[in-house]
Image (cartoon, rainbow, N blue to C red):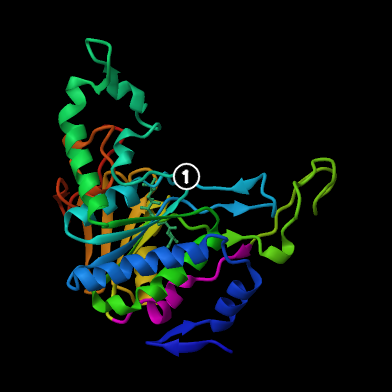
Amino acid sequence: MSPHTTNGVSINEDAENTYFQTNPSPKALTKHQALALEFIQYHLENAPDRRIVLVTSGGTTVPLENQTVRFIDNFSAGTRGATSAEYFLQEGYAVIFLHRQFSLLPYSRHYSHSTNCFLDFMEESEDGERVVVRKEYQEKMRRVLQQYQYAKNNRLLLLLPFTTVIEYMFELRSLATLMQPIGSRALFYLAAAVSDFFIPRDRMEEHKIQSREGRGGSGRQLVINLDPVPKFLSNLVHSWAPKGSMIVSFKLETDPSLLVSKAEQALDRYQHDLVIGNMLMTRKWEVVFISRDGGERWIRVPKTRRSKSFSGIEALVGKAERKPDSEPVDLEGG
Ligand code: 9Z3
């Protein structure tokens, strides 16, 4: 099949077909599909008005070998996705959390090893009989625990892991398709940091690449030849996702002069609902919303409200201070 056009946007079905036919589907896909189907049906039957959001979170890997020893990764810890998922749950959504395996998760992220070791929150009781949460952490931990248990007991949170960019794409397509019956109550919130390049299966080494054999370069150099990952946002918007659903994507840049134009370009190209732009260095404090009404709206967290434990979504809701015309925040001084 050749590319066709929907709403003026070309959907390359050839690229889609080739990608899904020539790359292996993840081993866990069938199990994930069954879990997602059960989750979606449960909410459709028990709470037909409930909105369901697919939050994607964390970075995708690009393996260099089929029996993978080495892979290309990216910086994303999953802070945005995990934090946002908590806020969606607080707003009454059921959340399908498609995340990079071992990246941050809603609720447990507060006690992640990357910021705090969970053991530092505990101590032995005075009588030495029990292990208890230290007094100064009790209030916050009780709150987090209650929210976590509420989500768990009401089956509001489904955790589905991925590792590679190929797995991510298969999972995204499959979940979006399963979400069809949700219609306009479905939301897609694509915060995962998805690799733009990958090695197709037919060019991937089977075994660990040996350092003594040159690979495409001279001598012992390793030259890696990557293909572009097809632009699946177009397929998601125009084919996989339910009609009338809301689709929010993120645009990440490191050069401030590109952020707004690239975000506008993405919105224009894919015709979805919202692009949230963020810069690598300032992503925890400021984001820009680019929406179809032509708006460019900056949301910034004032310097006085930033803390080391501050984790991202507060930049989007709640604690954020909206200053559309303000100067970019100077993080160095903050
Ligand atoms: C984002 O821009 C996310 O906000 C971050 C969050 C990955 C920066 P952390 O996980 O970071 O809290 O550490 N996600 C989207 C990145 C992305 O891959 N966007 C593509 C692009 O920029 C479009 S889908 O081209």
Q: Is residue 42 left or right of residue 224?
A: left
* Count of all numbered marks drawn on residues in the image: 1
Question: Residue 232, position in %: x, y?
Answer: 48, 71
Q: Residue at x 38, y 69 (%)?
A: 37
The segment highlighted magenta reads: 227-243
Q: In the rendered image, which residue does mark 1 sit on?
A: 75
Ligand 1 is within 8 Å of the C-beta of the residue at disc 1: yes
Furthest residue in direction front, as rendered: 129
**Does residue 11 appear anywhere in the picture?**
yes
**Does residue 327 appear anywhere in the picture?**
no
Q: Quadrant of the C terminus?
A: top left
Q: Residue at x 79, y 41 (%)?
A: 211
Q: Residue at x 27, y 50 (%)?
A: 152
* Residue 332 colored in magenta in the image: no
- Asked if residue 67 is positioned above or below residue 138 in the image, the reply reads below
Q: Is residue 18 left or right of residue 231?
A: right
